[in-house]
Image (cartoon, grey):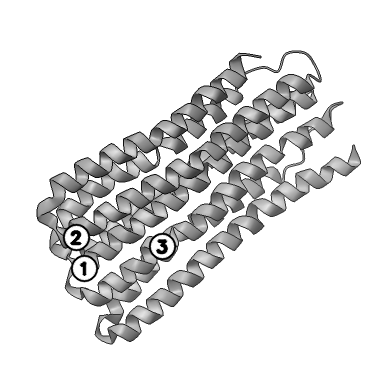
């Protein structure tokens, strides 16, 4: 039993460490982009610096979330006859916070980097560029927020874990939202990068780019909503008999199915939207055609995530 305390303290350490790795890399890339942008356009240094600082503040979100969860876990767990299972279940918190936080820490730097370059090219439109950057970065924090909510629910149920099957259930809940954040995070970074870059190409297309951004980012994140749904359902179901390894394994498999199922849809949806945004900046008069085509393609792409959702439901309820 004593050896399982390594899982408890390891969860605390990794919640901060892995999130800090992602945030550190993201902030380093953004700093480099800001320096290059100032070198390209020295006269725009004040606006580039402002863009850089605002972007860095939002990149820091994942590290703050990791620190908050680590501090909450520092309170020792109440000793029970099933303490080891409680410590196993804490891995769900680690998976949720660490995977989502490290992914978002890196990916949320992409809009900040290209916003700095856009300001260097169009310094007179810096406010609109900064506004678009803040919008896209704010929406990109959604996976971290979802992961934190799921981690809080897992923490609140630790005291009730009395079997290996129950620990698998909570591990699966955290794993689902953690893995489910990766694909949408990458897709959002690809699109947000292109949206900020487009403002440097054609700032007069701001209104079209803004409206397209709101719709496209909502579609890119739809597979993340499916992962959150499965995570919340896993927090409510029961594994049945004590030490029911089979039922616990089915719940863990459902988490893998939905979590990994978001990879392709999130990335592909982001790439499609990014290309459409690029063309809108170059040919704003084709906005309606580009938007309809992009949204149609994204909806079809999301059907793959729906298939994973159906199978995950089956693994949970048909046991």
**Does residue 301 appear left or right of residue 27 in this picture?**
left
- Whether residue 152 can be seen here: no
Residue 203, horizontal then vertical, whole percent: 17, 64
Q: Secondary structure at mark 2?
A: helix
What residue would you read off at disc 3? Answer: 110
Query: What separation in Å lies between label 1 and label 3 (alpha carbons)?
Result: 17 Å
Q: Residue at x 14, y 45 (%)?
A: 288
**Does residue 158 appear left or right of residue 184 in this picture?**
right
Q: Residue at x 23, y 76 (%)?
A: 121
Q: Which circle marks residue 201 in the picture? A: 1
Q: Mark 3 vs mark 2: give the one in front.
A: 2
Q: Please report contact status of discs 1 and 3: CB closer than 8 Å, yes or no.
A: no
Q: Depth check: 151 or 273 in front?
A: 273
Q: Secondary structure at mark 1?
A: helix
Circle 3 crowding by C-alpha within 10 Å: few under 14, some 14–19, many from 20? many
Closer to the chain start, of discs 3 and 2, is 3
The correct choice, above or below, for 24 with respect to 289 in the image is: below
Q: Please report contact status of discs 1 and 2: CB closer than 8 Å, yes or no.
A: yes
Image quarter in which the C terminus is found: top right
Q: Residue at x 72, y 42 (%)?
A: 75
What residue would you read off at disc 2? Answer: 281
């Amino acid at each position: 039993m004593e050896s399982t305390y390594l899982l408890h303290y390891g969860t605390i350490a990794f919640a901060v460490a892995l999130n800090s790795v992602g945030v550190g890399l993201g902030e380093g890339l953004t700093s480099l982009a800001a320096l290059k942008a100032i070198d390209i356009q020295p006269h725009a240094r004040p606006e580039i610096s402002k863009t850089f600082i605002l972007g860095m503040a939002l990149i820091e979100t994942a590290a703050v979330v990791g620190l908050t969860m680590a501090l909450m876990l520092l309170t020792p767990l109440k000793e029970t006859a099933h303490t080891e299972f409680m410590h196993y279940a804490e891995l769900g918190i680690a998976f949720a916070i660490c995977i989502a936080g490290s992914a978002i820490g890196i990916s949320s730097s992409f809009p900040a980097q290209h916003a700095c370059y856009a300001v260097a090219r169009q310094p007179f439109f810096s406010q609109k560029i900064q506004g678009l950057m803040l919008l896209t970065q704010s929406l990109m924090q959604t996976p971290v927020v979802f992961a934190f909510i799921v981690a809080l629910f897992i923490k609140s149920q630790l005291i009730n874990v009395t079997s290996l099957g129950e620990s698998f259930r909570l591990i699966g809940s955290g794993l689902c939202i953690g893995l489910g954040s990766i694909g949408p995070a990458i897709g959002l970074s690809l699109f947000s990068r292109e949206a900020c870059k487009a403002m440097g190409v054609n700032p007069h297309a701001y209104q079209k780019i803004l409206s397209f951004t709101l719709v496209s980012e909502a579609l890119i994140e739809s597979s993340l909503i499916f992962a959150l749904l499965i995570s919340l359902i896993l927090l409510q179901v029961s594994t049945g008999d004590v030490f029911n390894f089979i039922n616990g394994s089915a719940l863990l498999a459902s988490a893998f199915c939905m979590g990994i199922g978001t990879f392709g849809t999130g990335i592909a949806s982001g790439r499609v939207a990014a290309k459409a945004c690029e063309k809108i900046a170059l040919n704003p008069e084709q906005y309606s055609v580009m938007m309809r085509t992009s949204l149609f393609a994204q909806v079809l792409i999301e059907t793959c995530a729906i298939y994973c959702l159906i199978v995950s439901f089956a693994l949970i309820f048909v046991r």
